[in-house]
Amino acid sequence: MRVAGTMLLMRIFVAESDHHHGRPLYLAILETLKGAGIRGGTALRGIAGFGAHTPLHTDRILRLAQDLPVVVETVDSEEKIRAVLPQVEAMVESGLITFERVEVIRYAHPKQGET
């Protein structure tokens, strides 16, 4: 399958220590996206960051290194992203969710059974 054209990028900024029903929040978000039929998602662990009401967290300070920022990103059609947004919003108690229109140049993967 190949996809190209204007799509919507959703970024969700959370903390590594955030949880949803006993699971790391970033994993719960990825599972929700997958369950909604979103084409793909990635969780990126930051090396430093701060929020509106948090100190600067960095991987260089041992006691804060376990609460680093995590960004979950996904790109799909606006219709599919907006459809899953209420579920994601309900999961994110503290964080930031952004949208950005992006031009997808190429999104391709082998057909099942191909390598």
Image (spheres, rainbow, N blue to C red):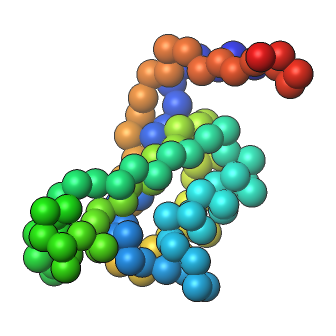
Q: Is residue 42 above or below residue 95?
A: above
Quick check: 98 above or below 111?
below
Question: For the point 13% across and 70% down, which residue is it?
Answer: 61
In the rendered image, is residue 10 in sight? no
88 sits to left or right of 60: right
Please tell me which residue lies in front, 6 or 106.
106
In which quarter of the view is residue 111 placed? top right
Q: Quadrant of residue 86?
A: bottom right
Res. 21 in view: yes
Judge left or right: residue 31 versus residue 15.
right
Residue 42: x %, y % from top left: 50, 46
The image position of residue 34, as x and y in percent, is 70, 52
Q: Residue furthest bottom?
A: 22
Pick the front one: 45 or 9: 45
84 to the left or right of 89:
right
Residue projecting furthest to the front: 62
Q: Which quadrant holds the C terminus?
A: top right
Which one is nearer the viewer's eye here, 98 or 66? 66
Q: Residue at x 67, y 45 (%)?
A: 38
Q: Image quadrant for the N terminus?
A: top right
Residue sitting at 46 percent across and 74 percent down?
92
Residue 11 falls left or right of residue 1: left
- Direction right: furthest residue: 113
Q: Estimate the x, y position of residue 17 in percent, counting from the top left.
A: 38, 77
Report the number of numbered marks: 0
